[in-house]
Every structure is written in structure tokens, then in C-alpha cells.
């Protein structure tokens, strides 16, 4: 499919898009020197080893070796085809792709693309019905009476679905969408009795659900009539474009604020997010009506380290907050818990007490995770009862032993010692026992807090001189055409490492086609992932731009020396074989050749 886009168009797209902007939508980047660093999205890690170069327009992970340009980043992370990735980037910078006429060949249209197109179309249609029509006026009045402003309705693109069984089905059909495909998208439902299609959402307030890039991938419809027998919320089913466990509501809107404030507030539902945003807390997101997953936690950690969980105050909400906190801590997050009066969720609290009180008295008064656990562990226990008291103390010490910060551990042990008049030494001894038990359980597990690698980690080892020389030569060749031709004259393609030989052949061909040095463009010509990883690694090396002729000659000598050493080893093997065959004259001749070769090396 990629061949359908002219090379000059691809180059135009690449030069119009900054890879830092693309990667920043998925990874929180911080500038260090000339490059940007963040947590690698391709494998779990707690220390940033993922580097992005704005100068070279490439990325490289020094942990797992992932590397490439903006196109390959989207292809690898989102699972897009080359054409889809190119279209994604082209749309960002308003570049038309005239050679791809998606409507002329329906058989080749990617199914997910059509599903997103249908969702985007309906989102605008639902929103128009709510804001501009008589049919949607009662729904608009309902929302305004509930405290929504028109600005919020616009920002969150809220809409209304008609009280009709087949309006949307006909609407989609008229615009060229196949209803069988729309059923898979979760927008229409097929009757088993007669095979006819009807609308999934009818007479509901429509809340669009977006992916990380802000594309509409699902809906949640809220019923208007409180006495209706239908469920209060009707959600899209999971589809190839919508996976609840990998979706966070409002992440695309909140991302900039999350990074600016270096924190995020996590809620259970989108109504709470909207209420929080109304309170001036734009860094608010929510899970999709399910428990927080590891994938969602990793998505959060790539954007920020500090998370405040604000779930409902009932027993289910508290249990869910405890579970979510454990997953977030394992992902490398620092977690706080916001608590509210019993019986209120964040949306209710804002309505009752106002935005400022919510901001200061709930979110601003958040507890540390350990303080919240201590409160949680007290529930249902009578600390006047000796058995309950001992059980509580043991439970708290066990939780303290899971903390990583030594100061935090000491603080809570002293707090426990003071409250119950227990010797600090006794508590520390108990803590050490729990700590030892935890270490035994880990049993040499990888201590990486995001331990679900998607790409294998690279083993680091010292390289021989010739290997380093080849790496440095290629690094210079990627930046300088003249150096490339000097190396070509001296070595042709005779590098010792097989991957290096393949890379330099690509480089020779690239420059012979008349291209100028541009590693991002060069990567476009390499299909092998291993070679791409090596190229991005070498391109990220810190090298002297004004390399001397003497330095280059030294690198070349190292490469040639290794070639001669390899030849000597081959001769030594042949000599041993001649001796085994009792051909002593041949063995002596080979020995003399080896001697002459060793002298030449010196």
C-alpha cells in the first residue's frame, strides 16, 4: 500500500511533522541537552531510556533497541500500515494524499478507518441535534438545568440521539456505510427475527469516547427519563477500534494540562471528569466503567508520575481505589487518594458544594496512599479490642514494608509507635521480617516496575576495538556524504559485522541516488527492524562533526586489521588440518604464510 504514495509526498510529510510532537502524544518527554527523553512505550521501564532527536527526526530506545522515524513510530505503536501512518501524519499538517482515493475501492478500505469515520460523522450529527434543533431542545434544557454550560457541551462534544428506531441506520446507509460493518462498529443492531437493522442509541444524551489522538471510537448514551426501565447508561460494545481496558476518557483533551501540572486526577466515570474540569482541574481522566488495567496505568505513567485517585465514597469505590493504587504503584506512579463525604460522587459534590470547595476540600486535601490504607485498614475494627489492635498493627507494618522510600517508612513506623505506645525497635523488627518475606517472593524477578516488555531488552557488553571503529565510521557516514565515499574507496563493503555490511550498502545506494544526509529519510529505505535499530542507535552517538583524516584512517585500519586477523585464524585452522592429515610440507608453508601476515600486521 505504501507504494501508492509518491516518495516526494512522503518526504514533504516527514519534513512538515516534528517527531517530538508526534511522540509527545504518547510519551512525556523532557529535554536533556539536544535530545528529549522519556519512558519507552515499547517496553516497561521506570528510568527513561527512550530518546527522541528533533535534529535528526528519529527516536531510539537504549533499553530495548526500538528506533525509527515518525512513520515507523506510529506503525509500531498503533499497529498501523505504512499508508495509515502516512495519512495520520498528513492529516496533522493538512497535506492531501491525492493518490489514495479511499472511496474508489471499498474492498481495500481498512475496516477500522470506516468505523472511525462513521463515529466521527455521528458525533457531529448528534451534537448538531442537541445544539441546533427542535428535536434536541428538551435534551439541551435537561443538560442546562443539570448545570452544564454550552461551553462544556461544545468542549466534550455532547449530543443527542433521536427517539427513532432506524434514523441512524438509514443515515449511515445513505452515506455509503455498510450496515453489516456498522453492526461490528456497535452503532446499529441486527434483529434475529427478520435480519433488519435498528439504531443502538435512541433518545439519549450522547457522550463520545475518544482514543489518545482524539478520534471518536465509541459512545455512551444516558437516558433522559429517570423512570425508564432501560439502563441509565448504554455503552458501545467492544470493537476493533474500542477496547475498554486500553481507553482512558478525556486523555487527549487533558494531556497538555497533565504535563503542565505534572499530575493527573483519575475518576471512575466521565460525568466526574466533566465536573472536575468545571472546577478548573483540566488534568482529569476516567476509566471506562471498569477497573483500572495495567495498560491504562502504563498510559498514565507515560504522561506523568503523580496520580490522585478520586473514586466514589461507597465501599465499592474504596475497594476499587485500593486495587487501582496497587496497579499504579507497580507502574511506577506516586499515588494519592481523594476522599469525599459518604454517599456523594464527585459530580454530586460539585453540584452540592461548588467547584471551589471540591478543588480545595477534596482534591487539595488528598491523602498519601499509606495514610489512606491506614484509614482503610481501621474500618470494621475496634482498636479497643486487643485482637483487632494487633491485627491492625500487623497489617499496617506489612503495608509499610512495601514502601520504597526509606524516609516514608520511618515516618509511618514512628507514627504507629507513638499512637499505640509500642517500641520502635519491635516495629522495625516486624517490618524487617515482612520485608524479607517480600524479597523472597520476588525471587530474582525483574525489578522493572512496568515489567511487561513488548520488545526484548538489549544486553550491554564491551565491544572490541574493530567493532567500535565500524560503529563510529557508520555514524560519520550517516552525517557526511564525503566521508562515506572515502570509506567506500578504502573498504568498499568489507566491514566485519554482517549487519554493518548491510547498512553501508544501503548508505552507498542512498547517496548514489543523489540524496543528502538525512537519517530519518534514510530509515525509510530499510525494512529490516534489526538494521533500523542499529542505524538509530548509531545516529544517536555523540561524535565530533569535524573528524580529522587521521581519526578516520585509524578507524579504517582497525577494520582492516580485524579482516587480517580473521584470515590468520582461517590459516591456523588450515594448518591444524594439514598436520592432522600428516601433510607437513603444506603445514610448514601455511605456518610461514601466517608468520608473514603477523609481521605485516605489526
Image: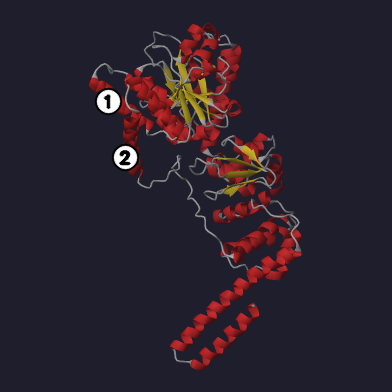
Q: Residues within 10 Å of mark 2 (few under 14, many from 20)?
A: few
Residue pictured at 68% horizontal, 50% vertical: 521
Residue 555 placement, left or right of 447:
right
- For the C terminus, the image quarter is bottom right
Task: Identify the secondary structure beneath mark 2.
Answer: helix
Look at mark 2 in the image and give the residue it sits on. Answer: 437
Q: Judge whether 454 appears above or below 558 on screen.
A: above
Residue 277 placement, left or right of 367:
right
Q: Residues within 10 Å of mark 1 (few under 14, many from 20)?
A: some
Disc on the earlier residue, 1 or 2: 1
- Image location of residue 151, percent across then percent down: 61, 14
Look at mark 1 in the image and give the residue it sits on. Answer: 391
Measured in 3D between alpha carbons, the distance from the residue under mark 1 to the one under mark 2, in whole angstroms, is 18 Å
- Image location of residue 490, percent across then percent down: 71, 70
Q: Nearer the viewer, residue 200 or 60?
A: 60
Q: Residue furthest bottom?
A: 585
Residue 494 placement, left or right of 138:
right
The answer to whether residue 407 shows anywhere in this view is: yes
Residue 62 placement, left or right of 399:
right
Query: Looking at the image, how many numbered discs can be counted on the residues?
Result: 2
Residue pictured at 57% horizontal, 53% vertical: 533
Q: Nearer the viewer, residue 10 or 333?
A: 333
- Where, by quadrant of the figure, is residue 499 drawn? bottom right
Report if the CB atoms under discs 1 and 2 are less than 8 Å apart: no
The answer to whether residue 245 shows anywhere in this view is: no
Q: Nearer the viewer, residue 28 or 57?
A: 28
- Image location of residue 592, percent across then percent down: 58, 88
Amino acid at each position: 500500500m505504501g507504494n501508492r504514495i509518491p516518495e516526494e509526498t512522503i518526504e514533504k510529510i516527514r519534513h512538515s511533522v516534528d517527531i517530538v510532537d508526534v511522540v509527545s502524544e504518547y510519551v512525556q518527554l523532557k529535554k536533556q541537552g539536544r535530545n528529549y527523553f522519556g519512558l519507552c512505550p515499547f517496553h516497561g521501564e521506570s528510568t527513561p531510556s527512550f530518546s527522541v532527536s528533533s535534529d535528526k527526526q528519529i527516536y531510539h530506545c537504549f533499553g530495548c533497541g526500538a528506533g525509527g522515524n515518525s512513520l515507523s513510530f506510529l506503525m509500531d505503536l498503533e499497529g498501523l500500515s505504512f499508508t495509515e501512518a502516512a495519512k495520520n501524519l498528513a492529516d496533522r499538517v493538512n497535506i492531501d494524499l491525492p493518490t489514495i482515493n479511499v472511496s474508489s475501492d471499498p474492498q481495500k478500505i481498512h475496516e477500522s478507518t470506516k468505523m472511525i469515520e462513521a463515529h466521527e460523522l455521528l458525533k457531529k450529527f448528534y451534537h448538531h441535534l442537541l445544539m441546533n434543533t427542535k428535536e434536541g431542545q428538551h435534551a439541551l434544557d435537561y443538560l442546562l438545568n443539570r448545570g452544564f454550560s454550552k461551553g462544556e457541551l461544545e468542549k466534550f462534544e455532547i449530543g443527542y440521539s433521536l427517539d427513532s428506531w432506524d434514523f441512524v441506520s438509514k443515515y449511515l446507509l445513505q452515506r455509503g456505510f455498510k450496515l453489516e460493518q456498522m453492526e461490528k462498529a456497535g452503532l446499529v443492531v441486527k434483529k434475529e427475527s427478520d435480519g433488519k437493522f435498528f439504531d443502538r442509541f435512541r433518545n439519549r444524551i450522547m457522550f463520545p469516547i475518544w482514543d489518545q489522538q482524539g478520534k471518536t471510537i465509541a459512545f455512551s448514551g444516558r437516558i433522559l427519563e429517570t423512570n425508564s426501565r432501560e439502563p441509565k447508561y448504554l455503552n458501545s460494545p467492544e470493537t476493533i477500534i474500542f477496547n475498554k481496558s486500553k481507553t482512558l476518557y478525556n486523555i487527549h483533551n487533558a494531556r497538555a494540562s497533565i504535563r503542565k501540572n505534572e499530575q493527573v486526577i483519575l475518576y471512575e466515570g466521565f460525568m466526574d471528569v466533566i465536573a472536575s474540569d468545571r472546577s478548573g482541574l483540566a488534568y482529569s481522566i476516567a476509566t471506562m466503567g471498569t477497573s483500572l488495567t495495567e495498560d491504562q496505568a502504563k498510559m498514565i505513567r507515560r504522561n506523568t508520575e503523580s496520580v490522585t485517585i478520586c473514586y466514589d465514597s461507597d465501599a465499592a469505590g474504596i475497594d476499587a481505589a485500593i486495587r487501582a493504587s496497587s496497579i499504579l504503584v507497580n507502574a511506577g506512579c506516586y499515588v494519592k487518594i481523594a476522599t469525599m463525604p459518604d454517599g456523594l460522587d464527585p459530580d454530586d459534590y460539585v453540584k452540592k458544594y461548588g467547584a471551589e470547595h471540591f478543588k480545595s476540600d477534596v482534591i487539595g486535601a488528598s491523602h498519601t496512599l499509606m495514610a489512606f490504607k491506614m484509614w482503610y485498614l481501621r474500618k470494621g475494627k475496634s482498636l479497643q479490642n486487643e485482637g483487632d489492635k494487633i491485627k491492625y498493627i500487623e497489617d499496617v507494618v506489612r503495608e509499610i514494608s512495601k514502601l520504597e522510600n526509606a524516609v516514608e517508612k520511618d515516618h509511618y513506623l514512628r507514627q504507629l509507635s507513638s499512637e499505640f505506645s509500642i517500641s520502635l525497635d519491635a516495629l522495625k523488627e516486624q517490618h524487617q521480617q515482612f520485608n524479607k518475606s517480600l524479597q523472597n517472593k520476588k525471587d530474582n524477578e525483574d525489578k522493572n516496575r512496568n515489567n511487561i516488555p513488548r520488545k526484548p531488552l538489549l544486553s550491554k557488553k564491551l565491544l572490541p576495538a574493530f567493532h567500535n571503529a565500524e560503529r563510529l565510521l557508520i555514524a560519520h557516514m550517516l552525517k557526511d556524504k564525503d566521508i562515506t565515499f572515502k570509506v567506500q574507496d578504502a573498504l568498499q563493503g568489507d566491514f566485519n559485522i554482517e549487519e554493518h555490511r548491510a547498512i553501508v550498502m544501503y548508505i552507498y545506494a542512498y547517496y548514489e541516488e543523489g540524496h543528502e544526509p538525512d537519517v530519518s529519510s534514510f530509515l525509510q529505505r530499510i525494512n529490516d527492524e534489526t538494521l533500523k535499530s542499529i542505524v538509530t542507535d548509531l545516529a544517536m552517538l555523540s561524535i565530533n562533526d569535524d573528524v580529522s583524516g587521521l581519526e578516520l584512517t585509524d578507524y579504517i585500519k582497525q577494520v582492516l586489521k580485524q579482516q587480517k586477523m580473521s584470515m590468520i585464524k582461517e590459516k591456523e585452522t588450515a594448518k591444524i588440518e594439514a598436520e592432522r592429515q600428516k601433510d607437513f610440507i603444506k603445514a610448514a608453508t601455511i605456518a610461514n604464510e601466517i608468520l608473514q601476515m603477523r609481521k605485516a600486521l605489526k
